[in-house]
Structure formats: C-alpha cells, structure tokens
Amino acid sequence: MSAFAAAVGALFADPNIGKDAVYTPDGGTPVPVRVIARRADEITGFGEARLWSETTRIDLRVAEVSAPRPGDQIAIDGDAFLIQGEPVRDRERLVWTVDLRPA
C-alpha cells in the first residue's frame, strides 16, 4: 500500500471527516461504505445568467465501490440519493467523486 493510499484510508476512517453510508447498485445488494460528503454551492453560467444551486457530492473509495454508475443509490444519515452523471476518479485511482440528487 502506498503512503497516499494509507492517507486516504485514514481520512475516510476519521469520524470527523468520513461518514457511514450504504451503497446500493441498481438492482443489487446494499453494501456499507464510508464516504466524505461535500455539499458545496455551485454557480453555473447559462447565457448571461448565473444560476446558484446546492450540490451534493461525495467521495467514495475505489476499494469499496469499484464501479459506481448513474442510478445507483447512496443512503447517508437516513437520506437517499441517486448517482447522477458519470463518476470521476482521482489521479491516483483511489477515490471516486460522484454527484448526487435526492431519490
């Protein structure tokens, strides 16, 4: 295991950063996972207008979820979300970043 992989594992395990969640692939079996939630606001340009929207993004470890897909479900703190759009892996191929929408 690389030093970077060990650091990522420590971040997800930290109770102040990581959260317990349940990942359910579309039509599959629920799997307990750890996530890092990022609920940042986003400003999107649309022509001359600028639109503000709340976003829900999370990071998932590739070691726990090898291939998340749009339509898969994530439950965090009793709230259910669906993955929307294509998940993106980090440069080291250790973490997925996924956009979520309420289920």
Image: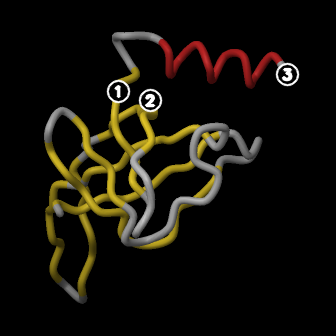
Q: Is residue 18 left or right of residue 43?
A: right
Q: Amino acid at mark 2?
A: Arg
Near-viewer residue (27 or 72): 27
Q: Quadrant of residue 53?
A: bottom left
Q: Amino acid at mark 1?
A: Asp
Near-viewer residue (64 or 19): 64
Q: Dot 1 lies on which element?
A: strand
Which x, y percent locates residue 51? 15, 71
| Residue located 19% across and 85% down the image | 48
Q: Which residue is mark 3?
A: 2
| Residue located 27% across and 76% down the image | 45
Which x, y percent locates residue 79? 15, 45
| Residue located 64% across and 43% down the image | 62
Q: Which residue is mark 2?
A: 34
Which mark's residue is nearer the viewer, 3 or 2?
2
Q: Is residue 18 above or below residue 87?
A: above
Q: CA distance from mark 1 to mark 3?
A: 24 Å
Q: Are marks 1 and 2 in contact (CB under 8 Å)?
A: yes
Local crowd size for mark 1, using a 10 Å CA cut-off: few (<14), some (14–19), many (≥20): some
Q: Is residue 92 left or right of residue 83?
A: right
Q: Which mark is residue 92?
A: none
Q: Dot 3 lies on which element?
A: loop
Q: Amino acid at mark 3?
A: Ser
First in residue order: circle 1 vs circle 2? 1
Which x, y percent locates residue 21? 34, 35
Q: Which residue is mark 1?
A: 20
Q: CA distance from mark 1 to mark 2?
A: 5 Å
Q: Quadrant of residue 61?
A: top right
Near-viewer residue (63 or 5): 63
First in residue order: circle 1 vs circle 3? 3
Q: Dot 2 lies on which element?
A: strand
| Quadrant of image for the N terminus | top right
